[in-house]
Image (spheres, rainbow, N blue to C red):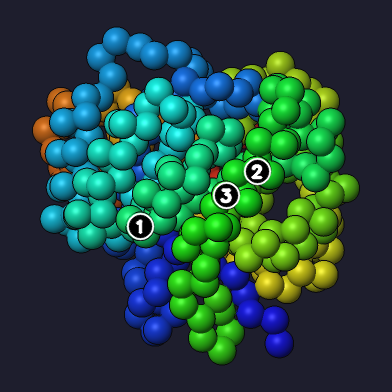
């Protein structure tokens, strides 16, 4: 029987040991978006402004938020951009990662990996960080086209190899049915790569990684690329076959999305639910604390109209950019 892959940072070792986390009522994840700028130009990017702006959170503000998350017994820090692992922001990223480690949080960094070095990977590995790499295609030409950056496929493959040379490539814990790992490959499903779902899932399994499918967000650059739109039935059938042939990567479609156990703080202090939620409830600088912000988020998520959308669809992505 194939063991299902789960990811350290979205799942936890204590879970595999039998700990029951109440994801419906507990805030588990702090998602932090310290900046939106990036060295790639993915054709579906949902970020609205990929440049440095005034009034972005200071490192001290971010450290304070992370410390409070630790005091509130959050379990994980999801660190997203923009691109987090850039050479010219590495000093800041190191401070954020260290603060999260000291606070007892498991950090998961979403990255294109283009500027990852072995020294960076070792630093992250020593602080129990998990890495999520973009993996939209196994075709170099197609990958570079989707990333909007020549050479992007090669840099991602290189980054994956680097990460696997450290403990990030090791199994954290396993039981009879599941295997907890620190590598995640994320694919944004669209009309250009729907024929690759099976091979992408198999690639992840062969590299000791969890594979995750993301849907297009009808926001930002995706609106300018209608060629990406995918028939929802074609997508669903491709996913069914991918899971059938790759049981290690089975997705629990019947369960609510775990990111609704999350609070997101964006680069200027905006507070939302998951990282792709732009329907903000306010600003943490005005609300005053992470604790108060989390209480407001909980009220939103517990509302019936939100909870009804948890299973089978995403209420944040009310328009999936898929055609019927």
Taking the spot 62% from the left edge, 75% from the top edge, the residue there is: 4
Q: Earlier in the sequence, mark 1 or mark 2?
A: 1
Compare residues 218 and 154 and report the one nearer the observer: 154
For mark 2, give the secondary structure: helix
| Residue position marked by numbered label 2 in the rendering | 158
Characterize the local packing of mark 2: few (<14), some (14-19) or many (20 or more) Cα atoms within 10 angstroms: some
Residue 268 found in image quarter = top left
Instruction: Name the residue rendered at 25%, 14% in the picture.
Output: 55
Q: Is residue 286 left or right of residue 141?
A: left
Asked which secondary structure carries label 3, the reply is: helix
Cα gap from disc 3 to disc 2, whole angstroms: 6 Å
Q: Quadrant of the N terminus?
A: bottom right
Crowding around mark 1 (Cα neighbors within 10 Å: few <14, some 14 to 19, many 20+) is few
Mark 3 in CB contact with mark 2 (< 8 angstroms): yes
Drawn side of residue 71 relative to residue 278, left or right: left
Residue drawn where x is 25% and y is 47% of the image:
98
Q: Residue furthest front?
A: 119
Direction from residue 251 to residue 55 in the image, left or right: left
Q: Is residue 228 above or below residue 179?
A: above
Q: Where is 314 relative to 249, above or below?
A: above
Q: Which residue is mark 1?
A: 126
Tell me the SS state at disc 1: helix
Q: CA distance from mark 3 to mark 1?
A: 14 Å
* Residue tagged 3: 162
x and y percentages locating residue 210 in the rendered image: 61, 61
In this rendering, the answer to whether 110 lies above or below 254 is above
Vertical placement of residue 154 versus 251, above or below: above
Q: What is the crowding at mark 3: few (fewer than 14 residues within 10 Å), some, or many (at least 20)?
A: many
**Dots 1, 2 in contact, CB < 8 A:** no
Q: CA distance from mark 1 to mark 2?
A: 20 Å
């Amino acid at each position: 029987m194939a063991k299902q892959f789960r990811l350290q940072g979205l799942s936890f070792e204590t879970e595999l040991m039998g700990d029951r986390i109440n994801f419906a009522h507990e805030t588990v994840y702090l998602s932090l978006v310290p900046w939106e700028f990036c060295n790639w130009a993915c054709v579906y990017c949902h970020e609205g402004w990929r440049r440095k702006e005034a009034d972005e959170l200071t490192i001290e503000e971010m450290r304070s938020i992370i410390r409070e998350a630790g005091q509130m017994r959050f379990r994980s820090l999801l660190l997203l951009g923009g691109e987090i692992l850039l050479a010219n922001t590495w000093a800041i990223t190191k401070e954020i990662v260290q603060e999260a480690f000291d606070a007892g949080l498991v950090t998961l960094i979403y990255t294109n990996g283009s500027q990852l070095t072995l020294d960076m990977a070792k630093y992250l590995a020593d602080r129990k960080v998990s890495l999520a790499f973009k993996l939209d295609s196994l075709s170099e030409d197609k990958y570079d086209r989707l990333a909007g950056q020549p050479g992007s496929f090669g840099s991602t493959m290189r980054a994956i190899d680097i990460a696997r040379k450290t403990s990030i490539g090791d199994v954290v814990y396993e039981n009879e049915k599941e295997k907890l790992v620190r590598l995640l490959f994320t694919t944004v499903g669209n009309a250009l790569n729907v024929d690759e779902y099976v091979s992408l899932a198999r690639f992840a399994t062969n590299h000791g990684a969890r594979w995750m499918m993301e849907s297009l967000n009808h926001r930002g650059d995706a609106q300018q690329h209608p060629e990406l739109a995918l028939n929802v039935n074609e997508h669903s059938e491709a996913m069914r076959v991918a899971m059938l042939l790759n049981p290690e990567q089975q997705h629990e479609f019947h369960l609510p999305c775990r990111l609704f156990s999350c609070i997101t703080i964006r680069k200027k202090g905006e507070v939302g639910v998951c990282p792709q939620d732009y329907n903000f409830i306010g600003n943490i600088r005005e609300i005053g604390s992470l604790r108060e912000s989390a209480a407001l988020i909980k009220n939103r998520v517990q509302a019936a109209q939100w909870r009804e959308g948890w299973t089978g669809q995403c209420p944040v992505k009310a328009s999936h950019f898929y055609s019927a």
